[in-house]
Amino acid sequence: MRGDAEARVVDRMRVFVHPDGVALGRAAAAAAAETLRRAVSARGVAHAMFATGNSQLAFVDALVHATADVPWPDVVVFHMDEYVGVGPDHQAGFQRWIRQRIVDEVRPRAAHYLDGLADPPAECDRYAELLRTHPLDLCCLGIGENGHLAFNDPPVADFRDPRVVKVVELDAACRQQQVNEGHFPSIGDVPEEAVTVTIPALLGATSVLAIVPEARKAEPVRAALLGPLSTACPASVLRTQPQVALHLDEGSAGALGWE
């Protein structure tokens, strides 16, 4: 798996394997920028949702700092999940992540955040209405170590979820990942509940970029691409979607057996 990128199709999803995480981030940023430019050219505005976390750092850095002609003044930004009980300035909060790494850097037209301190059911309704009135042109997501998409962990994932946003209980593997990535000192410090955009709402975007570097994601990537279509690995649903492009590096593609 050498060269600029190896491209394949798995069921209906396009898969690109890049030599390393830097190349992955740059390629995904170029694809995201093109989607934003097309939306702005067509309608004067683009609606984009971004995942957070360590796996998204190279991509976001490339999109914000190294990609030309991104029409940020005409982009409306969303994020996809937040811990219940976590405020806008909490060091592990996703609102803070988006604000510091995207919004404060490029000043988009608007940014809409999930409020972890609000009443959770009411916040789900509020954010769902925002998403209904701002149909997503672009959704940039990752795959969790347990195969989750946003905070749709295996026990709560629903490929036909009737909701747009919901309150979920986080499973132990998901909470441990937050500790392993350095966001919380121990699993006891990780909130047990979150508010998340559901899988159908994530996949409702015109274009979906799944940005998945690092060898620690090799097993969930293998399960998503080669295992059964099942909420046991929520990311497996990605391969049913023609608007999804999955970007891997050699580490995250390492368990696929591709040459």
Image (tube, helix red, strand yellow):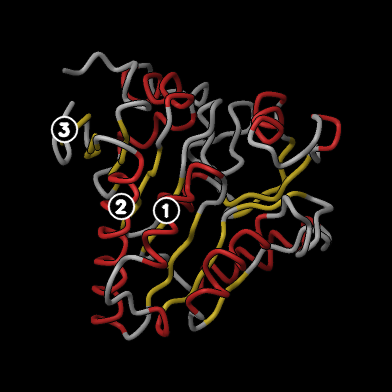
Residue placed at 63% from the left, 35% from the top? Answer: 181
- Looking at the image, residue 60 sits to the left or right of residue 18; the answer is right
Name the quarter where the C terminus is drawn: top left
| Residue 51 image point, x, y percent | 52, 52
Q: Earlier in the sequence, mark 2 or mark 3?
A: 3
Q: CA distance from mark 2 to mark 3?
A: 16 Å
Q: Earlier in the sequence, mark 1 or mark 2?
A: 2
As helix, strand or loop, the secondary structure at mark 1 comes to strand
Tag on residue 8? 3
Q: CA distance from mark 3 to mark 1?
A: 19 Å
The reply to whether dot 1 and dot 2 touch (C-beta < 8 Å) is yes
Residue holding disc 2: 28
Residue placed at 17% from the left, 33% from the top? Answer: 9
In this rendering, the label closer to the viewer, 1 or 2: 2
The reply to whether dot 3 and dot 1 touch (C-beta < 8 Å) is no
Task: Choose between 180 and 220: the one closer to the eye.
Answer: 180
In this rendering, the label closer to the viewer, 2 or 3: 2
Q: Is residue 232 above or below residue 59?
A: above
